[in-house]
Amino acid sequence: MTEKIFTTSSSEQTSAIFGAFDVNMRLLEGKLGVTVQNLGGTSPEEGDALTVRGEPDSVDAAIAVLSYLGQMTAAGDAVNEQTVEYVIGMVADGQGEEFESLTHEVICITCRGRPIRPKTVGQRRYVEAIRKNTVIFGLGPAGTGKTFLAVAMAVDALRNKEVSRIVLTRPAVEAGEKLGFLPGDLQNKIDPYLRPLYDALYEMMGSENFSRHMERGTIEIAPLAYMRGRTLDNSFIILDEAQNTTAEQMKMFLTRLGNQSKAVVTGDPSQTDLPGGKKSGLAIASKILGGIKEIQIHRFTERDVVRHRLVQEIIKAYEKYEKENPPAPRGAWRGDRRS
């Protein structure tokens, strides 16, 4: 057994690291087999001394995790159970130093003054891919920040006058349920399909600023069908939910790319809602375009999920089920005994 001391910068930082009802610290202790005790400090401003006891390797890992969590809280980022679990995994894999760089990466500032940063190494690599390439495919499960980060990069490019407009589009495909007739004009009819894009833009820009950009035409949100026949110059273009495009739609979208433009295509290949067993255009494009210069395909994993920690477990459970229960061949049914 060994013991080491980690010192926080303030009692407020200690509270942020420990989490509500010390939930973060209980997770760290359980995962690494150590005990952490807060000895307090001489004053709230001077911070607290935390003693970490356990096996030498476990104590060293815990100190490293506490150090990275301290850097996150110092940068103003929230720490929760999912964050702690992710940092523990990064330290265990010897990638702690790579994680450290996340606290220095700021994509843009929201209307409320909150910095938008990549929260995982996978997200940081995705952001780098967007910066360096002309066409980027962001593939991965729900909750990995594919769309949100792409929108943040688009807003940053617009603010820096790297592009003159943002074009956001989605295929209008219902996710497993029929919505029926939708009242209103065109905008009212397509709004339900495009709501996630609105949410991200409201977060970045604020509703009033967003509305002004929409009125000026510097931000355009439209269903994919309305992209046909256009050439999009000096634009940051995002195609969301691309797993629901057909091969023809994907080809049509990619050939809209004009001069001084960038396109980001996001989607989850495991959540295709195309009817009639149609082949996803995203699946085809990610297979045939990967070797072309200035096109990069970035794949997220369940480790990059930044929603509730249960989302990771849900994704793993579904992946396991799908491996054990592959879909029946087209034209056949489960239990079919034909040879």
Image: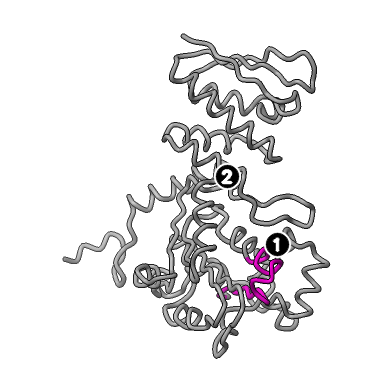
Q: How many callouts does the rendering have?
A: 2
Marks 2 and 1 in Cβ contact (< 8 Å): no
Query: The C terminus appears in which quarter of the rendering?
Result: bottom left
Question: Would residue 178 be found to the left or right of residue 198 on screen?
Answer: left
Q: Is residue 114 above or below residue 27?
A: below
Comparing 19 with 61, the one in front is 61
Q: Position of residue 26 (x, y in %)?
A: 59, 23
Q: Residue furthest left?
A: 339
> Which residue occupies 61% across, 49% down?
105
**Which mark sits nearer the N-terminus, 2 or 1?**
2
Residue indicated by mark 2: 102
SS under mark 2: helix
- Answer whether residue 197 is magenta in the image: no
Residue 199: image tag: 1
The residue carrying pointer 1 sits among few (fewer than 14), some (14 to 19) or many (20 or more) residues within 10 Å by Cα, namely few
Q: Position of residue 21 (x, y in %)?
A: 69, 25
Q: Is residue 125 above or below residue 101?
A: below
> Which residue occupies 52% across, 38% down?
86
Magenta span of residues: 154-171
The three-letter amino acid code for the residue at tag 2 is Leu
Question: Would residue 299 be found to the left or right of residue 83 on screen?
Answer: left
The three-letter amino acid code for the residue at tag 1 is Asp
> Which residue occupies 71% across, 64% down?
201
Comparing 42 with 87, the one in front is 42
Q: Position of residue 37 (x, y in %)?
A: 63, 14
Q: Residue furthest bottom?
A: 229
Comparing 105 with 2, the one in front is 105
Q: Position of residue 42 (x, y in %)?
A: 77, 13
> Which residue occupies 57% across, 44% down?
102
- Answer whether residue 170 is magenta in the image: yes
Question: Would residue 44 be found to the left or right of residue 176 on screen?
Answer: right
